[in-house]
Image (cartoon, rainbow, N blue to C red):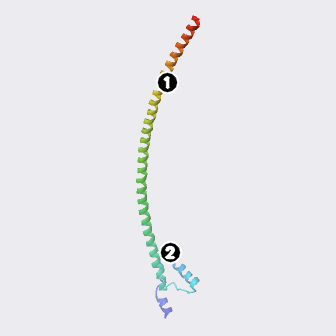
Amino acid sequence: MDEHHKSSSPPMPELPDGIGLTIEGVRSLLATKNSVSVSPDDPILMMVTLLNAFLTEEENLLDRHRKALTTILADRTDHYVQAVEQISASLGKSLSSSSLSEIKKIFVEHDGIMNQFRSSITWLAAIIGTSALVNVAVFVWR
């Protein structure tokens, strides 16, 4: 009866297997691991097709999730990069302006010190000149 059923039914069409095991691979695995020979038209092999379809759909779902995460991370990264660039620019400006104001302040302080030094040098030169004249006058007078 089984032979008659096999000969009258058309051979089972093989569906593309997607990312999972092939039907022949499963038959070979069952023969190797379980010492069970399964015919190509055994209904248990429909599970292979169903599980492979499940794996394909799961891979499609994971791919959609990967694309969505990539888009989200790219957008967030762009926002972070822009924020860092803005902060860097504002820090650069504030540091430059504060550095510039500090440099100007130091120059003003040093200018005041230099003016005081010039004034002191002028007074010292006048004192030395006067002292030299007094020494010469005393030397000539003696």
Q: Position of residue 51 (x, y in %)?
A: 46, 78
Disc 2, SS:
loop
Pointer 1 residue? 117
Q: How many marks overall?
A: 2
Q: Earlier in the sequence, mark 1 or mark 2?
A: 2
Q: Is residue 137 above or below residue 108?
A: above
Compute the Cα span from label 1 to label 2.
Answer: 91 Å
Q: In percent of the image, x 55 and y 83: which residue is there? A: 30
Q: Quadrant of residue 90?
A: top left
Q: Position of residue 93 (x, y in %)?
A: 42, 41
Q: Nearer the viewer, residue 98 or 83?
A: 98
What amino acid type is highlighted by mark number 2? Gly
Q: Position of residue 105 (x, y in %)?
A: 44, 33
Whether residue 31 sits left or right of residue 97 in the image: it is right
Q: Is residue 91 above or below residue 64?
A: above
Q: In percent of the image, x 42 and y 62: which residue is there? A: 69
In the drawing, what numbered circle is on residue 20?
A: 2
Q: In percent of the image, x 47 and y 29: which residue is there? A: 110
What amino acid type is highlighted by mark number 1? Phe
Instruction: Give neighbour class at mark 1: few <14, some 14-19, many 20+ (Cα, 10 Å).
Output: few
Q: Is residue 87 above or below residue 105?
A: below
Instruction: Give neighbour class at mark 2: few <14, some 14-19, many 20+ (Cα, 10 Å).
Output: some
In the picture as drawn, the residue positioned furthest to the top comes out as 141
